[in-house]
Amino acid sequence: MNIAILCVAILALLQTALGISISACRWKYKRSTGVPDDPAHVMKRIVTAYENCAEWHPVFFALLLILPMTGAPKWSIWLGPVVVTARCLLVAGLVTFTLKKSNIFRFAGAALTYLTLLMLCVLIIGAYLTGTPTPNF
């Protein structure tokens, strides 16, 4: 469970760093609301990365913290670091390159995001269907 908690904290820090970056961009570009329409503009790229994290991270928080409670295989704990790697790759691809076209970081980050999400769901649902003991709440 400690690895899962650490991974959740790292994902939260990633989103916090993006939020701070947005605030810095608002200050720098003297823009209190909205973002430029230009997909190459740094503020647009950072806001897109932040929005993506805001959509995906809560699901990963829940799944990563539930997984150890299901009696899942010991190897599954390493899905947490894979999720962190996937999200960092995706953010790097969104922030570093223009949004006009895809790049290897965005592709790898998105592919790993979908793959790990599916694996986490299958493991948790599988544990439920097989009657693996879970704590009573």
Image: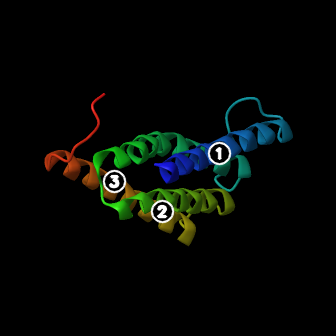
Q: Earlier in the sequence, mark 1 or mark 2?
A: 1
Q: Could you tell me which residue is drawn at 22 percent across and 50 percent down?
A: 127
**Residue 36: x and y, percent?**
69, 43
Q: Which image quadrant: the C terminus?
A: top left
User: Left or right of 24: which side holds 64?
Assistant: left
User: Left or right of 54: which side holds 35?
Assistant: right
Viewer-closest of 95 and 112: 112
Q: Element under label 3?
A: helix
Question: Is residue 107 in view from this perspective?
Answer: yes
Q: Is residue 71 above or below residue 136?
A: below
> Dot 3 corresponds to which residue?
120
Q: Element under label 2?
A: helix
> Dot 2 corresponds to which residue?
82
> Dot 1 corresponds to which residue?
13
Amino acid under label 1? Leu
Question: Mark 3 Cα within 10 Å, few/some/many (few <14, many 20+)?
Answer: many
